[in-house]
Structures are given as C-alpha cells and as structure tokens.
Image (cartoon, helix red, strand yellow):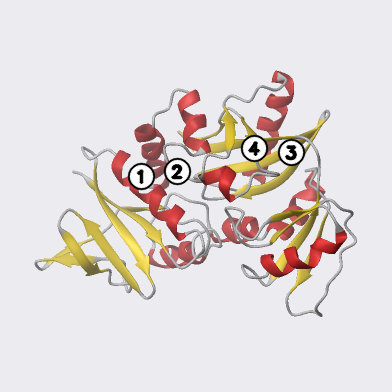
Amino acid sequence: MKKNIAVITGGEASEKGISLKSADVVCKHLNKDKYNVFKIVIEGSDWLVEHGNLTRICIDKNDFTFSIEGHKIVFDAVFIAIHGTPAEDGKLQGYFDMLKIPYNACGVLQAALTFDKLRCKEYLAPLGIRTAKAELLKKSEVRNQKSEIAMPAFVKPNKNGSSYGASKVSKQEDLQAAIEEAFKYDDEILVEEFIQGTEVTCGVITIDGKVTTLPLTEIRTKSEFFDYKAKYEGNSQEVTPAEIDAALAKKIQETSAFIYKKLDFKGMCRIDYIIKGNDYYMLEVNSIPGLSEESIVPQQARAMGISLERLFEISIEESIPQA
C-alpha cells in the first residue's frame, strides 16, 4: 500500500520563495509508485493542500489531517521543505512530535541550536571545532553600536538563512549601515571576522542507519562572499567534488560526521567551512539545505551516484519507524 507523504512548505520567513521551489522539486521526484504525495503550503493561519485538482482545502491542525468527500487522509510521514522559521528553528518539529507524526528533518533541539549561529558555535567550540571569531549585537541595546572585530568583517542576522541581510564590511564607517540592514531580519546580529580562504561545504545524511558524508563542494563566487545572488542567481561556480587536497577533504568530511553525531542529528544537513592554509573553520550548520536540482546537496548526491528520487526516498524512509 502506498504511503501518504506530506511535503510541507511556505511559511512567513524571508526564504519562503526558496522553500516553495524546494518543495516543488521534492514533489516532482518522490516516487509516485510508492507514495501519495501531497504538498501542504503554510499561508498565515491556513495550511492548504495541493494535490491534483484539490484547491484551497485546509489541513485540520488538531491532528494534521484533511478530508476528501468524507474520506479522512492521514499522513505516514512529513517531508519538511521550509527554509527558515518555523522549521529551521524547530517550531514545526515540536508540533509533529506532539502528534507523533514522523518527519525527515532533525529534531527541535538540533534545529533551534543550529538556527542560532552564535550559540551553535559556542556549543561546538569545546568539542574542538574551530570557528571564526564573532560578536553578538542586540537590537534592544543602544544605537550606534560598535564592534571589537577588526575590519573587514561580515555582518549578518544571527537567526536567518540564505544570506538575507548579510554583508561584508571593509571600513569601520560602513559598519552602522550594515548593522541596520541586518536588524531588518533579526533582533540579534553577528559581526564575524573575515577569513580569507577557500569556502567548501559538506552534506551529511543517514543512509540505512549509517551517518554518511557526501563529496565536498567548493564555492567559487563572483560576489564578495556567498551571498543571495551567488546562491540563487548563478553568481557563483560550485565545483563538486571540491578541487582541494584529498587528505584535507577527508578531514573535513570526518569533522562533519563528528558534528552530525555530537548534535544527535537525523535527516540531511549541510555544514559550511572556510579553509585557510591547512586549517579550516566551521561557518554554520544548515539543518534544512536547499533541494532544487541545482542546490548543493543534490549536486553532491549525484556526484556519489545518488539520484534525486533516491535521495528523497532515503530521507523519508529513514524517518519512518520500521515495523
């Protein structure tokens, strides 16, 4: 019997458009011979079902079901395709935990921690994970805030993704404008030291119960950093596998698996790094990475011989308890 899978997307975050694109790709590639796939779009207080000719049918949020001609549809699992809140901060996972509905992403604690960039750094630092120096500024504190971080530096929201509100600042006199821009997206922002080096990223996923690292991708951006245009408008070159020293690549993969295990992660994630000489620094952990055909984790999976159909099937099947 086919399993009913909800692909949930939308939301009110600045990344809503990216979430919708990811969900469309997931719905396209999930195996229709195995699954009945329903896209659920969060639009404010309405959670709307999209499936075939169905339009404007609302989910009953009391039990995450809906009805067609008196027949109640119950979901076997949820594929979360929301970037930003309410998924990358763990709110949605808490809802599904209460309903005892399995989902393919990490849990509440892992999502909340990795969504908060500074607290994630602070958690991982005692475990030997190198990170760039960063200073936290709060919107509630006095205006014209200054930072002790030397220029050039990055200014970015502490809890946001897709580089919305992020900028590179080269001169102290430009810092205040960058701070004000970042505060449009979060009430806490980071001023983070700039490390000149090679940016790479590593996807991690559980396959048949085993934590598996994907080949690294090297980010070669035409922008000053891997910003929104570089990520989503073709303003970068992404090389998979990364053209770096094989021994160093293996170390970064081992570090990524270590972080995944120490955070007690599940599902797939992507961990970003900057390499300087023989050292590498973790930038952030992305608990729900982009899932379009061109996105990095799908690129890495293909380089490993895993199709999108197989990748999404692995992700959803790992979430469903085996009888």
Look at the numbered disc 3 and give the secondary structure of its residue. strand
Estimate how packed mark 4 is, as few (under 14), some (14 to 19) or many (20 or more) residues with alpha carbons within 10 Å: some
Position in image of residue 120 (x %, y %): 70, 55
* First in sequence: mark 3 vs mark 2: 3
* First in sequence: mark 3 vs mark 4: 4
Q: CA distance from mark 3 to mark 4?
A: 13 Å
Estimate how packed mark 3 is, as few (under 14), some (14 to 19) or many (20 or more) residues with alpha carbons within 10 Å: many
Position in image of residue 244 (x %, y %): 70, 22
Towards the viewer: 100 or 45: 45
Look at the numbered disc 1 and give the secondary structure of its residue. helix
Note whether residue 289 is visible: yes
Q: Dot 4 corresponds to which residue?
A: 221
Image quadrant occupied by the C terminus: top left
Q: In front: mark 1 or mark 4?
A: 4
Q: Dot 2 corresponds to which residue?
A: 291
Note whether residue 209 is visible: no
Q: CA distance from mark 1 to mark 4?
A: 27 Å
Count of residue discs: 4
Dot 4 amino acid type: Thr
Q: Dot 3 corresponds to which residue?
A: 274
Q: Residue at x 74, y 25 (%)?
A: 248
- Marks 3,4: beta carbons within 8 A: no
Dot 2 amino acid type: Leu
Q: Is residue 249 above or below residue 162?
A: above
